[in-house]
Amino acid sequence: MYAEFFGLRQDPFSIAPDPRYLFMSERHREALAHLLYGIRGGGGFVLLSGEIGAGKTTICRCFLQQIPENCRVAYIFNPKLTVGDLLKTICHEFRVEVRHEGPLPATIKDYLDPLNEYLLHSHAAGEHNLLIVDEAQNLTPHVLEQLRLLTNLETNERKLLQIVLIGQPELRQILARPDMEQLAQRVIARFHLGALSDDETRQYIQHRLDVAGLRGPNPFEDDATRRIHQLTRGVPRRINLLCDRAMLGAYATGRARIDRKIVDKAASEVLDPPVQESTAVALKARPNWQGSLGTLGLGALGGALVAALLYTWWPRPDTAPLPAPIAHQAPAQAATAALEDRVEPAALSPPAAEARANRPAPLPPKPQPGLPPATALWTQEGEAWTALAERWGAQLGEGDACEQGLGQGLQCFRIFRMTVHGLRQLDRPALLQLQLPGQPVGWAMLVAMSSETATLQAGERQWLVPLTALADVWRGQYATLWRQPHGHEGRITNARGTAAGDWMLEQLRQLQHEGKLSASAQDADSLIKAFQAAHGIETHGRASPMTFMMVNLVSGVEEPRLSAPTH
């Protein structure tokens, strides 16, 4: 909403873990070094702890991009599991086939035997296997003991399974208990991720503004930046929340500079403990509440959240009542009209007329909990491709969807062994082939993801699916679209020597100039390999479709992205 007002291409302080905004402080680099040392140290446990919002997910993403090519990864993001569910999840992540016969449920031995066999064969093939458990403070003692037992399988040189535990500070307290001594003795590297310093907070804010396309001076005054560090205690997620609200407040009052007063006002809205009273009582108690907006009532407030934030919680210098007609307009119109009335036209970007033309799209359907029924899935793949193409603004007719997409600058991408981590990394709507028990295969479109759930869509309906449940019906079949460089025609398999390849090298050199790629990479091969290694892609040095998709993501090419699930 405020991006163009400040000369930005996009909002810089989203709390989503966008890889383009990766900021590595000295503490983050040291934490990453501990993780990398741990997986080269012969096995056992590696421990990374940190406060909520300190950047543990950022470290994990960067870590996954730098692990060796011969390392296979299983990632558990929801550790609230029984021992049996844990082993089942590990087997699924490593693609270990579990054979079970008989009417009774599978036993722990049914999972352990094929897992041990897999680890032995994998080691003989020169592969390393890494298990990452996020939010590990939620693991029960029984599950922790099972994890310890999994590290018993070893050769003379190393253990066959290395385990990384990532969690909040209480994880360290759990491992310090007397009954956890056996596991604690197997921790070969540990690091506690602290908060950013005052100087790092300033660098962090500047970095995110630069990535978002800031073309002028930093809108945060020095005193405001110091206050942000004081209020957030240097925790990146809290910094994002506070800066986002401060920029919204400055935009609402037409101020191009953000001072300490605006930061304090923002902090009172996003960092205070939750208010216990009802929304109506809380809003009525605020001294700057204008009667003309108060008449909207709770129903209108739900639809006018932005208007309430801008004009109730961010008082304008002049406190005259709003013109009477505004109170009777739709909430979004009231907000726009109030801005036009209170802010000089030169301060508005884009103009109000353009803002009206770009009204938000209708809200998507509310997802239903659980897996979609087989009868709701797309049974014709062409129908699924048509729905997916609409996300890219493309229209498909009868015939081959991928050939039609090429004529509109889009190329299909398919893979049959995608992982949950890969879904997050590519960060784009995609088609997943599902097979519910006893049912034929069908297609659903992935449209949103969180750390624990995925939102699937088929037709006009959506479902909020736990990732653990998705793993039972999805075996890795994945299909999506990506936008080719402007002017290129035809399918790209290896763009070396083409205009598309030249475009990619231009983007990579820009990333290198910004310090995001190794300065030692000079020729095309080394540049592409450096980028591929940094983003967890097979380092073959070819300008492949997967590489193009990641370059598009990092460079900010306009493509649809996965959103946060709605509940």
Image: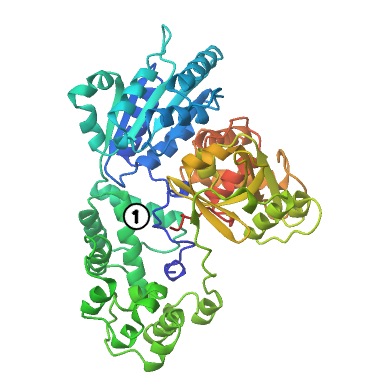
Q: Position of residue 167 (x, y in %)?
A: 31, 37
Q: Secondary structure at mark 1?
A: helix
Q: Nearer the viewer, residue 56 or 540?
A: 56
Q: Position of residue 190 (x, y in %)?
A: 29, 28
Q: Is residue 430 visible?
A: no
Q: Which residue is mark 1?
A: 205
Which image quarter is the N terminus in?
bottom left
Count up the numbered dots.
Answer: 1
- Picture quadrant where residue 186 is located: top left
Q: Is residue 418 visible?
A: yes
Tell me if 8 is positioned left or right of 459 in this view.
left
Q: Amino acid at mark 1?
A: Ile
Q: Are there few (<14), some (14-19), or many (20+) residues within 10 Å of tag 1?
A: many
Q: Is residue 356 above or below residue 443?
A: below
Q: Is residue 462 above or below residue 63?
A: below
Which image quarter is the C terminus in?
bottom left
Q: List the single residue furthest toward the left.
A: 178
Q: List the single residue furthest toward the bottom.
A: 324
Tell me if 12 is positioned left or right of 96 in this view.
left
Q: Is residue 255 above or below residue 74?
A: below
Q: Nearer the viewer, residue 549 or 444?
A: 444
Tell me if 77 is positioned left or right of 436 in this view.
left
The structure's colour scheme is rainbow
Q: Nearer the viewer, residue 78 or 69?
A: 78
Q: List the single residue furthest toward the front.
A: 103
Q: Position of residue 193 (x, y in %)?
A: 28, 38
Q: List the single residue furthest toward the right.
A: 399
Q: Nearer the viewer, residue 85 or 138?
A: 85
At a point 28% along the width and 31% down the height, the residue shown is 191
Q: Position of residue 479 (x, y in %)?
A: 65, 44
